[in-house]
Amino acid sequence: MDNKFLNFINLHNGEEQKEKVLENVAANIPFRGSNLWILACAILIASVGLNVNSTAVIIGAMLISPLMGPIVGAGFALATLDFHLMKRALKNLLIATLVSVLVSSVYFYLSPFKEVQSELLARTSPTFYDVLIAFFGGIVGVVAITRVEKGNPIPGVAIATALMPPLCTAGYGLATFNFSYFAGAFYLYSINCFFICVATFLIVRYLKYDIVKQTNKLVEKRIRYAVVISLFLMLVPSFYLAYNLLKEKEYSQNAERFIETEFINRGYTVIYKDINYAATPKSITVAFLVKKFKPEEIKTLNAMLDDFGLHNTKLIVKQDVSDLKSEILTEIGTRDKQVFKRDLEINALKNELNTYKIADTTLSKELKILYPEIRQFYIGTLKHTDMTADSTANQMIFMYQSDQKLDSEKIKNWLQARFDQSPIQVVYEKIPPASVR
């Protein structure tokens, strides 16, 4: 039973020849010629995606990026103690990184749109979860590389580990001189590279790839120490950032609970709220539609913050109109812009429809008196296209049914005077035999 289970999970099943795998890995390391052009274009696409906040564009850029090559190569080199391959991999990774940051920096420097979007902001604060994604994504990637049937995990690994967006965000940080964004994004990129490399190292060791060059025990021990120290240096900041993220989320939940318990459940309409975890001291700013608080009440509410786990926090109640104006306008500004744009589009459509619509309830009564022979009529505005002159124009059409054809010119002159519009085309349609009474 144990042998069957071990055989079931054995990674040697379906394994590609080791020599062929190493050849493919080495071939994907260099960054020159077409690879460099593809990388630069992928970086530009990802930068545009971050700039316009388009997830689909960012995913597309990650799919065409060739960045995984030197990272996986470094993992193979470390596992097989191939220092020549390691040197090539690190050199090409450095070239790829510098080119990527340079291209994205130039793009964001020249772009007129420098507003920070949510997709870009998400790459500035790496956490321990990014470590897990990079590590397990790296395992999937190297397992796929060492298979005879490659399958489709590689594109998924490129998307999951997200090497491109952090580099673009680092470029944005340089272009806008926001070095905190640059540091956070570059740290996320370093985490992804390092843990993909570590995952590759572990799988290659497990698959027992031959050591390229026999070294003494001291060299192997130094390599192990270097890996452990690097792991420590990468993990400690990510744990700290993950802890901060957890505390911020917990704080936000407590703040929302405080606002709901002390204000919303008491029937006060909150028209503005801002929870600032980064401030010193932390702050919760609120404003109300009608309710006015006395200084004593605000003092009591501040004293209650500790009961909700909101330590070192100050409650600010905006009650003066001048204080409220800027905050409220800022909050609703984006929404108003969207509403205004929608209203413009609706008005444009209404105006276009009005050009085709003829609203006249008295026309049928007048026609009944002037032309009793007319049984049915159709009137409206259609778009007339002159194929010879390659031009289009709106034209009123009047089509009528009767037992006999009437004086079309007379009807046309009357309609032109009636609607103060020309030209008008009058069309006669004879009543079908089945309709004649």
Image (tube, rainbow, N blue to C red):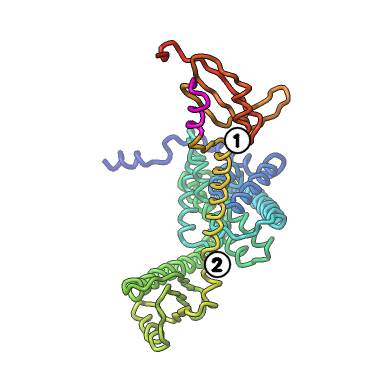
Residue at image point 47% right, 71% down: 274
Q: Quadrant of residue 253?
A: bottom left
Q: Tell me, yes or no, if residue 391 can be seen here.
A: yes
Where is 270 relative to 195, above or below? below
Q: Main secondary structure of the magenta part?
A: helix
Q: Which residues are magenta?
A: 363-374
In the picture of the structure, the residue carrying the numbered disc 1 is: 419
Q: What is the quadrant of the C terminus in the image?
A: top left
Sooner in the amino-acid sequence: mark 1 or mark 2: 2
Q: Does 124 appear in magenta?
A: no
SS for callout 2 = helix
Measured in 3D between alpha carbons, the distance from the residue under mark 1 to the one under mark 2, in whole angstroms, is 49 Å
Q: Position of residue 20 (x, y in %)?
A: 56, 35
Q: Position of residue 264 (x, y in %)?
A: 35, 71
Q: Nearer the viewer, residue 73 or 331?
A: 331
Residue at image point 53% right, 49% down: 55
Q: Position of residue 34 (x, y in %)?
A: 69, 39
Q: Position of residue 294 (x, y in %)?
A: 41, 86
Residue at image point 46% right, 72% down: 275
Q: Nearer the viewer, residue 55 or 356?
A: 356
Q: Nearer the viewer, residue 242 or 198?
A: 242
Q: Amino acid at mark 1?
A: Phe
Q: Quadrant of residue 411?
A: top right
Q: What is the quadrant of the N terminus in the image?
A: top left
Residue 155, numbered circle: none
